[in-house]
Amino acid sequence: MTRRLLCALALATALPVGADEDASVSASASHDLTTFVPTRVEYDSAGGLGEAYYYYEGRLWARWETDFPQAERNFAKRLTQLTAIVAAGSPARRRLTDEDLGDSPLIFMSDVGYMQLTSAEKAGLRGYLENGGFLWVDDFWGDAEWASFERAMRDVLPERRWQPLPIEHPIFHTVFEIAEMPQIPARDFAWIGDTAEPPWIHRYPQGSLEVPQIRAYLDDEGRPMAIATHNTDIADGWEREAYGEWYFENFSTKSYRLGINVVVYALTH
């Protein structure tokens, strides 16, 4: 992918959290091809209220738009501040059937526990991944939501199986050293003190929600071409960084570290 290559060439170095934020790279319209644009995938979900969509903060939200667009805006700001990547502050929104999907080296999907993909969308995603694109799926919890997601993906790459990524994998060490997979709860549940979200808000049968996991589709060289962060809500750590110093220190910093590692890995492998 041309955009992936140009973004990778623009990546010169990375700074740890806590480094001087003045050492950021400023974005410019003249650098459009080398600008990393956070891209959210819009998809359809099965069911009604509480399934395909939910009511929160005074309006109805489709599952695909959970944490969007503030999560991407905040992440782009931190990515630009803490690395040499120029990230666009305005995220893109795409369907898997869009002809320009391949312009995005990494696409992001959220809250996929009720997701349904058409044959055309499955074909579009397959082509995207086989041509070098990278997929990150986040924020779905429990056994039923994983099973539903896995079924939806089965026809995309039927020859692949989701594989757990061990903590020794380079994705945990590309920029920041990450010793364990972080579990990030939605903001409204963080104050309870348990990082696992309550079962009643997720699809039945929930099964275990306590252990955060990261799984991957691996290419023929053994490199991740898609990852799924399950039993955790990484993007909420980005979206809700202004919730307070306690939330930022305990959750947002962990979310940003993993997010930056994933993006740098995706752009350079």
Image: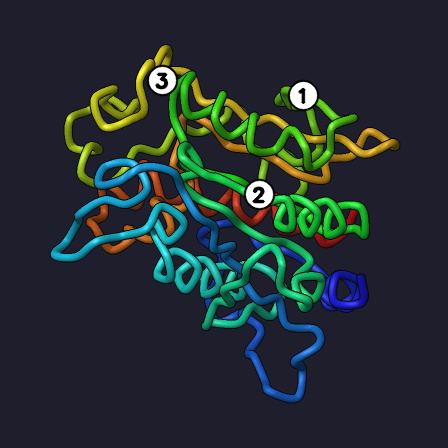
**Does residue 186 lie above or below 35 as drawn?**
above
Q: Secondary structure at mark 1?
A: strand
Residue 193 percent coordinates (x, y): 19, 24
Circle 1 is placed at which residue position?
163
- Pointer 1 or 3: first along the chain: 1
| Residue at far left of view | 58
Q: Amino acid at mark 1?
A: Gln
Quarter assignment of residue 36: bottom right
- Pointer 2 or 3: first along the chain: 2
Relative horizontal placement of residue 30, taking residue 230 as reference (left or right): right
Q: Secondary structure at mark 3?
A: loop
| Residue at far right of view | 221
Q: Amino acid at mark 2?
A: Trp
Q: Amino acid at mark 3?
A: Leu
The reply to whether residue 254 is visible in this rendering is no
Quarter assignment of residue 236: top left
Relative horizontal placement of residue 235, taking residue 127 as reference (left or right): left
Q: What residue appears at the point 67 percent right and 41 percent down from the top-left corner? A: 174
Circle 2 is placed at which residue position?
136
Q: Are marks 1 and 2 in contact (CB under 8 Å)?
A: no
Q: What residue appears at the point 68 percent right and 52 percent down from the top-left corner? A: 124
Alpha carbon distance from label 2 to label 3:
20 Å
Circle 3 is placed at which residue position?
209
Residue 134 percent coordinates (x, y): 68, 47
Residue 137 percent coordinates (x, y): 52, 40
Q: Secondary structure at mark 2?
A: strand
- Pointer 1 or 2: first along the chain: 2
